Structure formats: structure tokens, C-alpha cells
């Protein structure tokens, strides 16, 4: 019989090893799955994880890695603040949409004005849009004790409907011959989140993601708020004695994570995506949950996890076009990753002991 | 706009149909939460049930076999959750989310090639005499077997939870797992059984969507039903009878907004479509004032050494 014995303290070694172990198990089980689908598992894993980085066309894919990773990292950094404190913002997808709507809305309102202040205004609007959407579950939780998980999630569906309404109505391109979707911001230089260094994939969203990582790192290691967040998550009662105001903490965490998700949406709509459209959102808000956990809620971990998940997106698209692997396989692959991570996590907090049946 | 085109009898009858998926899923989750486990993976288990039921029903030509497959599919996914939370002692919130993300991906994968197909029809059972009653007949007594199953399940869950020894033990495990363990009850085993039951119910609810309510398979077709089912359990203050009332309320809202859309009401379609979610939030706000009814050990991990 295997028995679990609680460790007095979580093992530091396993905290670092478990994410890698989870990735390894996911590759093995994922490979078996691809084999079951009639694909060569080695080729599939190589197409997803190796070719985009080191393959023949890597020069094209490497910049893409930053483009995909930036929103994931931005959102996941925000989520990690709340998750650490036991505040579960699951609705980042909705906050991402609202940030994009607010950012694009401001940009389109100025069209076709050419001015240097348009883009900064859009950034502020994007952050505020996501912040406001994140404050709804926050305020409802602090005022009425409403479950923030369910509320933030419901708001995703509301945001999706608003997105559809805006793409078909208020923000629709007047020159678009009745097609849904807004003007393309890529063709409006003042509002375009262009590549900062051509050919690298680095746009302002990537810069923001890196700033967020640094900001979060300092917050957790040097700032009182970071300490309060950790304390509230690990020992809520002690936190109250230490003078942590739980309501304020909830609002700060949900507001910040909403603002970061909103920023991600704004950078996406003004850059890689270009326009508001019905299917503008692609699930970054949900994938970022996996990124946050896989990164151990640690800023540097999240940076690495974001790059890894971005790789599965790019490699997955490759595998889709080259090997005919269904797009859904990647989504499942990502879900599986979180699954195995949670499963092997037991090693961090518990020691496994082999025990023979005791004689009573 | 022509509101007279809305037939109240048909509206009530479709309300019953619309409420069945969330009723089934919420009843399952009610039992799970009463055992002290918070499984947020309802959405994932529902959509897995939806595709399992759909695929098997299409291949066998029998909706009945499809529903059984859906229950098994939902339970299988729930078993993964049970392993994570009961053996690996993983955080229940994170595990539930993992279940939903995994289920959405898995169902999309399994559903390749099933888009655009029609499932075999589920025939209605007209209960003799009763179904001929005016208004009440078509509303209550002229439905498919799953509607009756869901309704009898409400009664069965209420009875088992409140009037049997098994229900008492289950509730004890949910209220205070330490005490239940000290009394010699197998906390882990009871919770796993509850989780499996919840998964099977969610699977049935999902299959009801893909086989009866919609009826077809599209990716992500549950569109938040699982989350509404979770909200329903809070709304019902963890009581079986109130789950039925809540399901009718939400079924009514979703049917009414569809009817209003069809009648061409001046409100844009998108705003009508978001109404069920907004009302769920509103109801949650109203019901959240009283948290005292939640099972005492809800969401807490049990390990015998504690």
C-alpha cells in the first residue's frame, strides 16, 4: 500500500520538478492519444514542440511565440495575484473581451485622426474596461458575499454577447459593406499596436507582459501587498489578525487581474487581431488559468509556462495543417497538462511511503 | 412585435424541456456538495456527456443507449476528478476547472465528424388519460422519458438525503468529515460515490441537450449550462425541492427569451441572449446573503492524518 505522509513544509525541490514532470507525462499520454488517432506520435510531438523552435521554418514561428505568449502571460500574472490569496477570478476571458472593446472603441472614436496620444488613450481605456468588468464580481463578493467564481464566469457569456452586438452594431465598419466586424486598426497608424522591432514579434503587449512579470516579482518579494496576498491565501485567520482587510484585498486582486486581462485584449485587438469581430476571443482567458498554475503562481514560472503554452498553440496549428491533427486535440492537450500537474502536485506536499499492511 | 404568437401552454411545456438539463446536472452537484465536495467541472462533464450520448445514439440508433453512454462518460470524467481530489488531495477548485477545460477539449475532439448529423428521435410518452387534460396534459404529461426520470430523481434525491440512513451518513460526511471519520465512516469512499453520481447526472443533462433539446452536436454547445447548474445549487440552498423550482425559473427565462426573439421584440437578440446569465448573477446576489446552509466541509480536503 502507498501511504501519504504530510510534509511539514512543501518540498522546494518538488515545487520545481512537478511542472516538468507534468509536461513529460502529458507528452507521453498525449503521444499515446495521437497514436490512437492514427498519427505517428513521435512526429506529432516533434511538430508541436520542436519544429517551431528549431525546425526549418523556425525563423517564422519564433516571433509568433512572443505574440501568442504575451496575452497569456499578462492574464496569468493577474490571475496569480488572486489565486495566491484564494480569490478565484475565472472570468478573465470576459475581462479580455471588455478591454478589447473599450480599447478599440476609443481608437475607433478618434478615426481618422492622426495623433500620438490616441494609442496611450486606448491603453488606458483597455485597462479600465477589463478593470471595470473584474470589479463586478469583486464588488458583489465584498458587498453581498456572492461567489466570485460563478459571477466572473457568467460575465464571460455576457461579454461574448456584447462583443457580438458591438461587432454587428456600434463598432461595425461603416465601409464594410454590411459585413460584421470593425475597421481594421492595423490600417490606422495612430491606433496600431505595430511590431516595435520588425520581424521579432515584439509589440507593446510583449513589453507590457515583461513589465507585468517584473512588477509582480517585486510585489511578491518586496511589497507589503504581496505579503498580504500570500498571508491571506495561506492563513486567512492570521491575515485578519495582521490587519489585512479581506474586502480591500479582494477588490485589489480582482481589479488588477481584470485590468491586466483588459490590457491583453486591447493589445491583441489593436495588433495581431486587428479588429473587433464576433469570434475575436480565442480562449486566452481560460488557457491563462493553466499558465498560472503551471507557472506555480510565480512570475518567472508564469513567464516560462506562457511561452510553453504559446508553443503548443503554434505547434498545434502546425500539426493541424501538416498532420491533419484536429485543433481540439491541442485544447485537450492543454487541459491534460493541468490535470497531470494537479495530480503530481501531491509529491510537493506529501511524502509517499510504502507500507505493508499492519497487523492489528 | 406580436406577443400573441406566444402560446402559454407551449411555453410551459417547453419550459419543462428547457429546465431538464440543468435540473439533472444540478441534482447531481447537490449530492456532491452535500458530501462536502465542490466539483466545478459540471460544464466539462455535461459536454462530455453530450458528445458521448450523441455519438453512441447516432451509431446505435437508440437514444436510450445514448443516455446510458452519456451517464458513463460523465461518471468517467468525474472519476478523474475523484482521483485528483480524493487520492492526490489536489485543490478542488483547480481540479474542477481542469475538468472543464479538459472536457471541452475532449468533447470537441470526440465530436469531429458528428457536426451536422441528426440524432435518432427520442419519442414522447403520453401518459394515458392525464395527457388528455387541457393545459396540464401537454405541459406535464406528454414528454420524453428523461423528463419523468429527472422529476422522479428530484423526489428520490430528497428522500434518500432526508429519510434514509445512507443520506444521513452522506450529510454527516459533508458537514464534518473529521467527525464522520472518527465514527468510522469511509469518508473517501462515500465522496467518490457521490462524485460519480454527480458526473453521471451531469452527463445525462448534457445528453439531453444534444439528443432532445437542440438536437444536434456543436462544439461548446452547453454554453454555460453547467455553471448555471452550479449556481442553481446555491440558489436552492442545497435543497432538492428548491433545485426543481430554480430549474423551472431558469428554464422559463431561457424559453421566454427565445420566444421573445422569435416574436421580434424590439430588444436586440444579443441582450436577450445574455439575460439568463444576468439573471443568474442577480439570483446569486440575492441568495448569497445567507451562507449558513452550505455544508460545513464544502471544498475542504480530507486527509486522515489531519
Image (cartoon, helix red, strand yellow):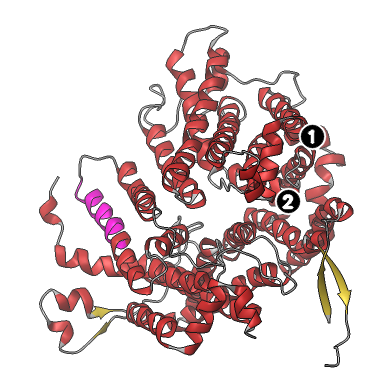
Residue depicted at 44% across the width and 50% down the height: A146
Q: Nearer the viewer, residue A47 or B254?
A: B254
Q: Nearer the viewer, residue B257 or A140?
A: A140
Q: Is residue B40 left or right of residue A291?
A: left
The residue singled out by tag 1 in the image is: A62
Which residue reaches farthest bottom?
A360
Picture coordinates of residue B96, whole percent (x, y)? 60, 61
Which residue reaches farthest front?
A241
Q: Is residue A122 magenta?
A: no
Q: Secondary structure at mark 1?
A: helix
Which quadrant does the C terminus of chain A fall into? bottom right
The residue singled out by tag 2 in the image is: A319
Q: Residues in magenta?
A: B251-264
Q: Nearer the viewer, residue A216 or A281?
A: A216
Mark 2 Cα-neighbour bin, 10 Å: few <14, some 14–19, many ≥20: many
Asked whether the viewer can see residue B18, the reply is no
Mark 1 Cα-neighbour bin, 10 Å: few <14, some 14–19, many ≥20: some
The reply to the same-chain question for discs 1 and 2 is: yes
Name above or below for residue B80 compared with residue B5: below
Amino acid at each position: 500500500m502507498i501511504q501519504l505522509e504530510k510534509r511539514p513544509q512543501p518540498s522546494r525541490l518538488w515545487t520545481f520538478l512537478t511542472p516538468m514532470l507534468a509536461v513529460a507525462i502529458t507528452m507521453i499520454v498525449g503521444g499515446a492519444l495521437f497514436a490512437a488517432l492514427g498519427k505517428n506520435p513521435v512526429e506529432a510531438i516533434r511538430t508541436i514542440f520542436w519544429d517551431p523552435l528549431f525546425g526549418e521554418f523556425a525563423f517564422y514561428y519564433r516571433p509568433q511565440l512572443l505574440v501568442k505568449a504575451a496575452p497569456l502571460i499578462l492574464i496569468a500574472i493577474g490571475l496569480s495575484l488572486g489565486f495566491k490569496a484564494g480569490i478565484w477570478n475565472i472570468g478573465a476571458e470576459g475581462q479580455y473581451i471588455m478591454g478589447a472593446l473599450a480599447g478599440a472603441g476609443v481608437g475607433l472614436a478618434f478615426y481618422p485622426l492622426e495623433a500620438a496620444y490616441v494609442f496611450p488613450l486606448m491603453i488606458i481605456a483597455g485597462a479600465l474596461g477589463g478593470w471595470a468588468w473584474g470589479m463586478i464580481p469583486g464588488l458583489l463578493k465584498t458587498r453581498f458575499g456572492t461567489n466570485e467564481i460563478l459571477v466572473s464566469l457568467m460575465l464571460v457569456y455576457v461579454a461574448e454577447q456584447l462583443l457580438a452586438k458591438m461587432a454587428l452594431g456600434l463598432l461595425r465598419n461603416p465601409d464594410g459593406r454590411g459585413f460584421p466586424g470593425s475597421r481594421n486598426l492595423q490600417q490606422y497608424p495612430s491606433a496600431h499596436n505595430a511590431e516595435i522591432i520588425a520581424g521579432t514579434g515584439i509589440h507593446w503587449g510583449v513589453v507590457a507582459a515583461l513589465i507585468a512579470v517584473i512588477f509582480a516579482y517585486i510585489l511578491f518579494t518586496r511589497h507589503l501587498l504581496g505579503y498580504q496576498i500570500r498571508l491571506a491565501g495561506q492563513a486567512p485567520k492570521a491575515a485578519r489578525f495582521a490587519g489585512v482587510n479581506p474586502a480591500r484585498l479582494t477588490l485589489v486582486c480582482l481589479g488588477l487581474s481584470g485590468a491586466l486581462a483588459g490590457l491583453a485584449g486591447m493589445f491583441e485587438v489593436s495588433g495581431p487581431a486587428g479588429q473587433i469581430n464576433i469570434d475575436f476571443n480565442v480562449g486566452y482567458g481560460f488557457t491563462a488559468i493553466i499558465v498560472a498554475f503551471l507557472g506555480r503562481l510565480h512570475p518567472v514560472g508564469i513567464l516560462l509556462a506562457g511561452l510553453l503554452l504559446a508553443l503548443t498553440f503554434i505547434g498545434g496549428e502546425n500539426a493541424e495543417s501538416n498532420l491533419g491533427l484536429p485543433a481540439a486535440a491541442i485544447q485537450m492537450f492543454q487541459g491534460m497538462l493541468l490535470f497531470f500537474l494537479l495530480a503530481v502536485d501531491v509529491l510537493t506536499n506529501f511524502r509517499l511511503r510504502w507500507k505493508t499492511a499492519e497487523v492489528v | 412585435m406580436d406577443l400573441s404568437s406566444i402560446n402559454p401552454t407551449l411555453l410551459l411545456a417547453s419550459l419543462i424541456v428547457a429546465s431538464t438539463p440543468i435540473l439533472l446536472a444540478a441534482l447531481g452537484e447537490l449530492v456532491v456538495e452535500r458530501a462536502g465536495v465542490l466539483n466545478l467541472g459540471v460544464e466539462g462533464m455535461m459536454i462530455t456527456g453530450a458528445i458521448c450520448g450523441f455519438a453512441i445514439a447516432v451509431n446505435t440508433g437508440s437514444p436510450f443507449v445514448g443516455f446510458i453512454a452519456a451517464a458513463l462518460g460523465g461518471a468517467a470524467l468525474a472519476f478523474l476528478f475523484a482521483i485528483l481530489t480524493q487520492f492526490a488531495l489536489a485543490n478542488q477548485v483547480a481540479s474542477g476547472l481542469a475538468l472543464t477545460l479538459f472536457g471541452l477539449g475532449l468533447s470537441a475532439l470526440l465530436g469531429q465528424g458528428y457536426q451536422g448529423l441528426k440524432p435518432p428521435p427520442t419519442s414522447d410518452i403520453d401518459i394515458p388519460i392525464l395527457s388528455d387534460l387541457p393545459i396540464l396534459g401537454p405541459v406535464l404529461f406528454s414528454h420524453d422519458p428523461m423528463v419523468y426520470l429527472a422529476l422522479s430523481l428530484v423526489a428520490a434525491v430528497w428522500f434518500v438525503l432526508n429519510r434514509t440512513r445512507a443520506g444521513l451518513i452522506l450529510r454527516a460526511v459533508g458537514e464534518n468529515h473529521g467527525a464522520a471519520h472518527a465514527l468510522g465512516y469511509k469518508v473517501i469512499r462515500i465522496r467518490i460515490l457521490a462524485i460519480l453520481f454527480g458526473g453521471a447526472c451531469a452527463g445525462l443533462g448534457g445528453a439531453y441537450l444534444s439528443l432532445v433539446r437542440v438536437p444536434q452536436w456543436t462544439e461548446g454547445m452547453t454554453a454555460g449550462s453547467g455553471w448555471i447548474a452550479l449556481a442553481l445549487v446555491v440558489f436552492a440552498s442545497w435543497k432538492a425541492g428548491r433545485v426543481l423550482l430554480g430549474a423551472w425559473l431558469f428554464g422559463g427565462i431561457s424559453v421566454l427569451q427565445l420566444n421573445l426573439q422569435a416574436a421580434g421584440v424590439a430588444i436586440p437578440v444579443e441582450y436577450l441572449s445574455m439575460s439568463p446569465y444576468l439573471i443568474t448573477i442577480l439570483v446569486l446576489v440575492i441568495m448569497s446573503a445567507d451562507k449558513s446552509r452550505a455544508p460545513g466541509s464544502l471544498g475542504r480536503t480530507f486527509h486522515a492524518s489531519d
